[in-house]
Image (cartoon, rainbow, N blue to C red):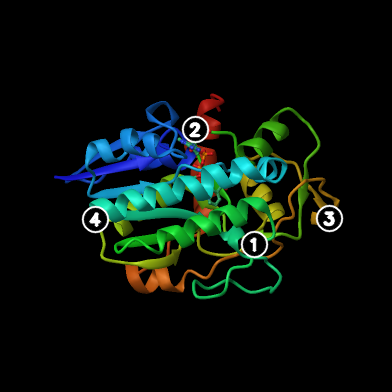
Amino acid sequence: MVEAVVTGSAGMLGQALMACVPDGINARGVTRADGDLASPAGVASAIEAHSPALVIHCAAYTDVDGCERDPARAWRENAVATRFIADACRRTGARLIFVSTDYVFDGVEPRPHVEDEAPCPINAYGESKLAGEQAVAAVADHLTIRIQWVYGPGRRNFVSAVYDRAVRGEPLRVVANQWGCPTYTPHAAPLIWRAAVSPWSGTVHLAGAGIASWVDVAREALAAAEIDRDVEPLDLDEWPSPARKPRFSAMALNRWAALAGEYPPEWQSGVRAYVHDHLLTEAGG
Ligand SMILES: NC(=O)c1ccc[n+]([C@@H]2O[C@H](COP(=O)([O-])OP(=O)(O)OC[C@H]3O[C@@H](n4cnc5c(N)ncnc54)[C@H](OP(=O)(O)O)[C@@H]3O)[C@@H](O)[C@H]2O)c1
């Protein structure tokens, strides 16, 4: 039995990871109540005390605009915490899987980003996650998995927000000129476990296959829910937000496909599954 620790297990991705632990792994989910990972004492009690051979670190301060308003907190929870966890894995020899983000890119070039491209974050969240990646790179057995546009059960997200607003008859104004690959947590979580128990190292991108704008994602969700509404396209620059957002942050998935032997499920299937298996079900629809 492999002893594993999953940080951020109360979060959206953490919940999905804990729901599909593979056979042969004894996974312990840790939350903030188990220790503040931005302190060595918190890492000792939440992680090292369990002597894991594998750590999947997905705890983070993920509110991108919140990070911009409070960059010290972003740095503490995303960069410093990850360094303490990396230090612990170096001491113990544990394999470290770090969940990172497309926001390490500036999104200027209108083409999917590859893993070896030089990162160039344009907001505090991206800067703090990139510092986390750099700390993780010092661990002998590590893998950074960059994901993006995450949605799924367990926390309010873009797809659930569009659905809720549509059901309430509220206006649907959605950014049309920002592109990425939406990632459905129940699709991504088993793939992250697969990577975690593999010998893969370095950095790899993982998301729903394809490229979409937020308008595309919203329209797919409305169609899946059979809600006859359209969205009003909005320019990214019209959306008031403290943090600058990368305009084109879709990630190339070729390395994932080469390692795994197949591409992840296409993004539309994730949106449809979420709407049918969760949003309509929870609404009694
Ligand atoms: N959401 C996205 O769209 C997205 C996109 C790209 C990459 N990612 C990455 O994917 C991973 C999972 O994201 P998610 O959306 O599932 O996150 P989430 O729902 O925001 O959950 C993150 C969890 O981490 C915990 N946490 C944060 N700082 C901590 C600390 N110092 N000590 C202990 N626990 C701490 C949070 O606890 P509290 O609630 O108590 O703060 C929260 O439960 C993150 O690494 C994120 O950077 C997410």
**Label 4 secondary element:** loop
Type of the residue with mark 4: Gly
Residue at point 58% right, 68% down?
Answer: 119
Q: Image check: 233 left or right of 92?
A: right
Q: CA distance from mark 4 to mark 1?
A: 30 Å
**Label 3 secondary element:** helix
Earlier in the chain: of badge 3 and badge 1, it is: 1
Earlier in the chain: of badge 2 and badge 3, it is: 2
Residue highlighted by disc 3:
237
**Label 1 secondary element:** loop
**Vertical comparison of 50 with 75: above or below:** above
Type of the residue with mark 1: Pro
Residue highlighted by disc 2:
154
Residue highlighted by disc 1:
121
The number of discs equals 4
User: Which mark is in front, 4 or 2?
Assistant: 4
Q: CA distance from mark 3 to mark 1?
A: 18 Å
- Residue closest to the eye, 140 or 20: 140
Point out which mark residue 83 bears.
Answer: none
User: Which mark is in front, 4 or 3?
Assistant: 4
Give x and y (percent) for residue 16: 40, 40
